[in-house]
Amino acid sequence: MERTKYLLDEKRMPESWYNVAPDLPFELAPPIAPDTREPVGPEAFEAIFPKGIIEQEVATERFVEIPEEVREIYALWRPTPLFRARRLEKALDTPAHIYYKYEGVSPTGSHKPNTAVPQAYYNRVAGVERLTTETGAGQWGSSLAFACQAMGLECTVYMVRVSYGQKPYRRIMMETFGAEVFPSPTDRTGAGRAVLEESPDSPGSLGIAISEAVEDAVTSGAKYSLGSVLNHVLMHQTVIGEEALEQLEMAGEYPDVVVGCAGGGSNFGGVAFPFLRDNLTTDRNTRLIAVEPSSCPTLTKGRFTYDFGDAAGMTPMMKMYTLGHSFVPPGIHAGGLRYHGDSPILSALVNEGLVEARAYPQNATFAAGLEFAKAEGIIPAPEVTHAIKAVRDLAVEAREAGERKTILFNLCGHGYFDMAAYERYLAGDLKDLEHPEEEIERAIARIP
Amino acid sequence: MERTKYLLDEKRMPESWYNVAPDLPFELAPPIAPDTREPVGPEAFEAIFPKGIIEQEVATERFVEIPEEVREIYALWRPTPLFRARRLEKALDTPAHIYYKYEGVSPTGSHKPNTAVPQAYYNRVAGVERLTTETGAGQWGSSLAFACQAMGLECTVYMVRVSYGQKPYRRIMMETFGAEVFPSPTDRTGAGRAVLEESPDSPGSLGIAISEAVEDAVTSGAKYSLGSVLNHVLMHQTVIGEEALEQLEMAGEYPDVVVGCAGGGSNFGGVAFPFLRDNLTTDRNTRLIAVEPSSCPTLTKGRFTYDFGDAAGMTPMMKMYTLGHSFVPPGIHAGGLRYHGDSPILSALVNEGLVEARAYPQNATFAAGLEFAKAEGIIPAPEVTHAIKAVRDLAVEAREAGERKTILFNLCGHGYFDMAAYERYLAGDLKDLEHPEEEIERAIARIP
C-alpha cells in the first residue's frame, strides 16, 4: 500500500518557535502613533498585553523556546498529521505530489489554539486573571476559551451579534470551555453603548467587537488577546511549518510551492515561514503563495501604507497592505478572511516580491473544497478552500506542463461548523460578491 | 515531557478483522423465522445483502483479511491515535492510568466509517450500484454517504423526519458526499405511505425509516446497509481494539478494564473483542464493561429472548437482550444508543457473564463529558459520555482503593454536531428521562 500520511512522534514536536524577523532582508517599518506619526515603542502595548507577549512581539532572536507547559497542552493534538493527497492527485490526474498539513485535529478544529495557548500561558505567568477578545464566526473565540480553560484563566468574548445569532454552536463551544460570551455591541462598554444609542438593532462588526474587548481589558485590569496579524501570533503558528519540514523529510520530499490562505496572515506565516527561512538562508527557492478572497483583496488590490489595525482607528498605525480601515468586506462565508489589512510582516514580504499573492471568488473555492472533500474525506473550512483552489490550479498546470511539482498547503481547519455554507453552495445560492472597486478606493482615500 | 499519545504508523494498520465467533465458549443462537420459529439460513438475507457481506455475517475463521482497497480508504484516518488522559487523571486525582482510543478523527467524526467502507466495497464487488439505509441523528447516514462516494456507489438515506428538520448539518454532510436524503416517512414506499395516510404529520422513527430503506432496496435491485447489531458490523469495528492492543504495548501497558458505550453494540465490540480474545485464549482476565443509557436499558433491564430487529417486525428474529421491538426509548440526546435490542453476540456475552453492563442517566453522563472536555480538549459525543461516566467512576474507585488500575475506553466520536445538547445541559434544561418500567413490561409482553 502506498503511504498516505506521515505522523511525527510527540518527542519530535518543535521545541522552539521560529521568529522570521532577524532573517528578513529588509527593515520592518515600526508601528507609528497616528497623531505624531513617530514610531511607538513596546510600552504603547502595555495597557493591553503582558510583558512576555510584548517581548515576543519585538523579539530579535531567531528561535524562541516553547515553554514546557505550552508543549504539554500542544501534545493534546500536536504534532498534527501530514497527508499525501493521493486520491486528489488521482482525481486531478496530475503528476504533482500534493501534501497537506491538517490542523483540524485541534480541540477547536483549526490552527488557532497554536497561539491561544501560549498567549494564555504568558498572561497567566504575568499574573493576569482574565483575558478579553473579540470573535466573528467563533474560531478564534473558541480557541481562546479552550486555552484559558487549560491555563486556569477567565475568558470574556465579544462575539459579533449577527454571528452570535447565526452560529450558536461556536458560542456553545466557548461556553462549554467556561467562557462568558456577549453579543456585541453590548451595553457593557462605552464603545458598545455609543453604537447602540445610534442603532439599537446594530448587527455588530469585528471592528466594534475589538473596541469593546480592548475597552473591557483596559478599564478592568484584564488583558486583551489577538488571534492574528501581530508578529508574535505568526511566530506561534510556525510550529506548523517546522513539523511539515520534518514530515516532508520523512517522505523524502521538499516542496516546490507552499500555499496558505491569508486573512490576518497567521495561518500563512505559520506554514510558510520555515520554508522562507530556507529561501533566505540557503539556495532553496520555494514559491510561497498567499491566497485571499477576491471580495476582500487586501494583498492583491490593497495599498501598502500605514493604516489602523481596527475599524474604529484606536490602535497604533501599522505599515501593511490595506483596503482602508473603514472598508467593510462583503459577507462571504470565509469569515476568517474578512479583514481590511494584513500582517505587517506578510505585507512587507509581498511588497518585496518574496511571497506571491492571488485571489479567488467564493464559488470557485467551494467547488475546489467539495472536490477535495470527495477525494480526501475531510470537509474543509471555507477559509482553506481558497488555498485548495490555488493548489488545484497548480496541480492542473503541472499536468499540462508535464511537470512533477511538489505542493504543500496547510489545511488549517475543518468545515463541520460551516455546513450551512456548503448547503448554499450545493443549492447554487452562493454569490461571488466581487469587491466594489469604488468602495475600496473610497476607503483607501479615508486613511489619514 | 510525559508522553500523551501513541501513534501507530499506517504500515502497522491491521491487515485482518477479528471474528470472535469461533472463540466463543458457547453456541450462538441462530436467527429464526417468526412463523415457523425454525432457524433461517444465510439465504434469508440475500434480498438485502450481497454474498460477500452474508459470508462475513456467518464467517467461521478467526481472522478475515481486509481488502487492500478498504485499507487504502482506512488510511485517510487510520490508525487512529491512542491518548493517555493525563490531564483527566490529574483532575480526578487518581492513580489509575486512563487511555482512550480516538475515533473522532474519521471523515464523519465517529467509528461508523470502519464498517461503512467495507460494506460499500463488498457491495460494489457484487455489482451493486446503489445502497439504501436509514439514519436517525445522521452519524451512520453520513458515514455510508462518505463510503459510497469513496467506492463510486449511489446512496439513498431515509432520515427520521424530526432529525431531518432539527439536525440539518448532518443532512448537508450526506449531500456534500453526494447522497440523496429523504425525510422519513416518505411517499416513496408503501411503508412510508401507510404511515402518512394515518398520520400525515408523523415525525418518523428509526423503525419506519428501516422499513422504508429495506423496501426501497428490495423493490429496486439496490441493496441495504446496516450500521450496527450484526456480526459483520462488529467484526469490521475490531480494527479499533487491534490497534489499541498494539498502542498499549508501545506504552508498556495492558488494560485491567475496557469500557465502551453500547447501542447496537458495534462500538463496544470493536474496542473490546480483541481483549476478549485474550480473556478466552490466554490467562488474561480483563473486565469488559458495556455502558448504556438508563432510559434505554437493554442490557441491564431487558429480557434475553428472541425478538425482531426492527420496530415493524419485518426481520428474522434474533436472540438478544431486548426491551421489546415496540418499545420507544425517550428522546435522549445520545441518539445512537436508542435501540430496543442489541447485538446477539454482545447479548450472549452479557448473558454468560463474560461482559458486564451498566446504565447511567443522561445528566450524569453530560457532567462526565464536560469534565473530560475541560481536561482533554475534545468535546465528546453524547453517546460516549456514557463510557466516560463509567471510566470516571472506575478512576475514583481506584483512588479510594489506592489501586493503580489501567483503564481503556473508546472515544467513538466528537460532539461538534451535538452542541445544542451541551447548551441544554449547561442551562440545566436536561431531563434524566428515566425509563418507564411498565412500558418496558408491556413492550416485552408484546414479543411474539
Image (cartoon, coloured by chain):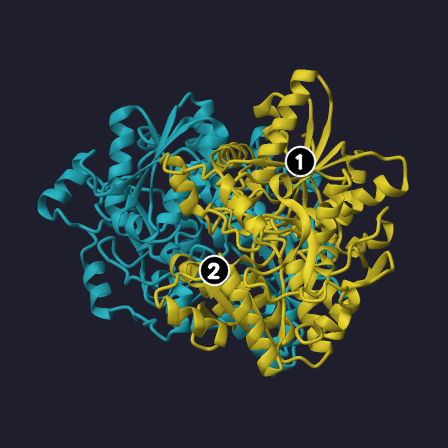
Chain colours: A yellow, B cyan
Instruction: Sort mark 1 into few (<14), some (14-19) or many (20+) by Cα contacts within 10 Å.
Output: many
Label 1 sits on a secondary structure element that is loop
Residue A356 is marked as none
Identified at 43% across, 76% down, the residue is A187
At which x and y percent is residue A200? 35, 68
- Which residue occupies the foreground of this view, A253 or A357? A357
Kindly indicate the quadrant of the structure image that contains residue B177: top left
Total numbered labels = 2
Residue closer to the observer: B132 or A425: A425
State the image quarter where residue A312 is shown: bottom right
Q: Amino acid at mark 1?
A: Thr
| Mark 2: amino acid | Ser
Q: Name which residue lies at 69% across and 57% down.
A: A318
Q: Residues within 10 Å of mark 2 (few under 14, many from 20)?
A: many
Residue A235 placement: quadrant: bottom right
**Lateral position of residue A145 relative to residue B58, left or right:** right
Q: Where does the image place residue B240, in percent across and percent down from the top left?
A: 57, 49
**Residue A43 vertical placement versus B259 (above, below):** below
Tag 2 secondary structure:
loop
Cα separation between marks 2 and 1: 41 Å
Q: Are marks 2 and 1 in contact (CB under 8 Å)?
A: no
The residue singled out by tag 1 in the image is A4
- Say yes or no: labels 2 and 1 on the same chain: yes
Which residue occupies 74% across, 53% down? A239
Q: Position of residue B95 (x, y in %)?
A: 67, 76
